[in-house]
Structures are given as structure tokens and as C-alpha cells.
Image: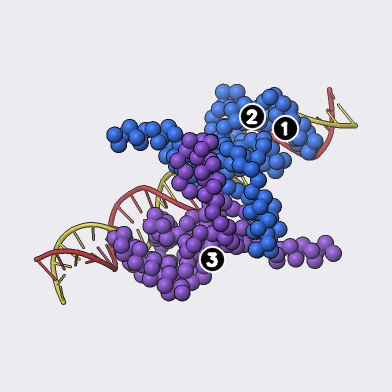
Chain colours: A purple, B blue, C yellow, D red
Amino acid sequence: MSELHLTEALDTLKQAGIRITPQRHAILEYMIQFMSHPTADEIYKALEDKFPNMSVATVYNNLRVFKDAGLIKELNYGDASSRFDFVTHDHYHIMCEDCGKIVDFQYPGLDEIEHCASQVTGFQVNSHRLELYGTCPACLAAKQKVSS
Amino acid sequence: MSELHLTEALDTLKQAGIRITPQRHAILEYMIQFMSHPTADEIYKALEDKFPNMSVATVYNNLRVFKDAGLIKELNYGDASSRFDFVTHDHYHIMCEDCGKIVDFQYPGLDEIEHCASQVTGFQVNSHRLELYGTCPACLAAKQKVSS
DNA sequence: TAAACTAATTATAACGATTATAAAATAGTA
DNA sequence: TACTATTTTATAATCGTTATAATTAGTTTA
């Protein structure tokens, strides 16, 4: 399953004429295997055993390469580091405001809103970003315990 | 109209025990009058005639104060500077990927999606963020001209 | 397979937005 | 008017990210 994602991803790169280096292979492998939403620095730290000489710039460069190739998405959160998300199927994110955990969830097409906005503003709409914020079950439970 | 927003905003601050300084007054006035989505630096530059000695830190500090008081919202765009939006009624933003222009538009309640996500993930949902991206009419026209 | 060409990596320094700090100034109140 | 906590200012620091230039290494072609 995750093997498939990896070979597909490598194929996409090859198609686009992008070289497959060991570092790129490892970064992709990491993102697919853990399916988390890591920062560039987390990836860098996770791979420093395997690549003691790898530069942070390499991580950033390659994340941009992957992003341009459509393999991953970048999630911005103001001052904090960007997080990167391997693209599988369309999904949205819900983030815990207490612990920062990010959970995926699916929701059927919001194409409707893109169409509506296009009508009203005259924009040609390419994409949208939707995120929810709240408190995750674990943090809810923790709060419950404190207050009781 | 914008007068009303200003006095309301000042009132909110007073209620919260936050002092009204000339700088705060001017920043609020600027945001309400132009109803744009300025960066901290744009505000800083716009007010440097009135306050030649004002520090950038003052702008940042007060934007945070206003944000905590619920008067404004912060819009993050990765590496680029945050933009700040005076809160009036609920609306969403659509951004031009070519020139960076941000336009407001309204769309009736997406409470449905908050409810749905809550069911699926077990989160308590507090808020959401939705943004659209595309090309504005002016940039569309410019492209048309070039290609014809 | 080896040479050649080009792209990628590394190490480092730079950048830019934002924040921390400490001293000076000031708003709000008694 | 005087007091006191808050705010402003000026400056330096921080941190994520990117630019640069030299070195290394994929890939292609002979």
C-alpha cells in the first residue's frame, strides 16, 4: 500500500525529469511511511542517522520540488514552521489548538462554493483551503479531569 | 458607518481595560477606514507621517492586542507577512495568485461541515478557515491581452 | 563502461518577519 | 497634580527559510 504510493511518486518524478537521489528517496519514504504532517526540521532530524551530512537546505529544496510536482502540499501556520502533507486523496485538516495535533477528514465537494465565489467576484478559481480548529478528544478529556 | 465601527472598537478596548493610546487609535482608524488587508509593515509605513517615532514593534504589539480582543483577524500566508483584517461580519477571502489582491465574499453557513467533522473526529470544533485562490479579473484580462 | 553534461547536495551566510528586552514616556486614576 | 502600571521606543536577537558558490553525483551518450 505505502509501497505503491512510493513507486507512484518516484514515477511521477521520473516522468517530470527530476532525478532520484538517495535523499529524495528517503524524504518521500519518510512522508509516506508515517503519513504525519511533519515540518522540514522534523524530516531533517528523522533522517540524520541515515544522512549525517545532509543539509537542511536539501530538505527545503526537495520539499519544494515535491510540491511543484504535486506530490505534497504545504500547510502554513503563520510564524510557526510549515507542515507538509503527502497528497493521496482529497481531504481536509482539523487541528487541535491545545496540542497541535492534525487529523485528516473527508468532506464531499465544496466545488459549489468555488463556483459561487467565481460568480460574485469574477475571479477564475483554481483551488481552496479549508481548515477546522478545535480541541481533540485527548485534550478534551484532560480538561475534564482538571475541572472535576 | 466607519465612525460607528471605530467607537465600538474603542469601547471594546475600554471594557477590557486596555488603554487607548494615540497609536492604537490611529492603527484602528486606518484598518477601519481602508478596510483593506494590510500587513504590519504597510500600517507602519502609512502612519509614519503622523508618528515619525513609532516603532514597528508597536504595530505588532497592538495588532496582537486587537487580535486577542477579537477586533481583528490574522491571515497567514507562509513566509510572506501576515495580513490583518478588521472583523465586521463573517466573510471569506479569495486571493489572486498573480497580483496578491484579496477580495471579500460571503457564503452562508458552513456550520454543517463543522458538525460533520466533529462527528467523525471527536474534536470539539471552535472555528474554521476557508480561503479560495485563483486569478482576479484584472489579471485575467492582462493574460488575455498577452496571448492574443 | 567511461566521459561529459547537468542537476543536486553541502556548508555557509544572508534575509526578513517577528519578538524579547530594558529604559523612557505616558494614559488613566485618585 | 502626582502616582503607577502599562505602553512605547530603540535595539538586538531569534528562527524559519533561501541564496550562493563550490563540490559531488545522476543520467546520457559515445
Q: Residue at x 80, y 36 (%)?
A: B15
User: Dot 2 corresponds to which residue?
Assistant: B32
Counting from the top left corner in percent of width and height, residue B27 is at: 64, 30
Q: Secondary structure at mark 1?
A: helix
Between the C-alphas of marks 2 and 1, the distance is 10 Å
Label 1 marks a residue whose chain is B
Decide if residue B45 is in sight here: yes
| SS category of the residue bearing label 2 | helix
Front position in the image: A99 or B124 = B124
Instruction: Describe residue C22's horizontal placement relative to residue D5 as left or right.
Output: left
Discs 3, 2: same chain: no
Relative to B147, is B129 on the left or the right?
Answer: right
The residue at which mark 3 appears reads as A36
Which quadrant of the structure image shows residue D28?
Answer: bottom left
Residue at the (59%, 34%) spot, across then down = B55
Q: Are marks 2 and 1 in contact (CB under 8 Å)?
A: yes
Residue at label 1?
Answer: B9
Q: Answer few, some or many: residues within 10 Å of disc 3's Cα (few below 14, many 20 plus, some between 14 and 19).
A: some
Task: Assess whether mark 2 and mark 3 are in contact (beta carbons under 8 angstroms).
Answer: no
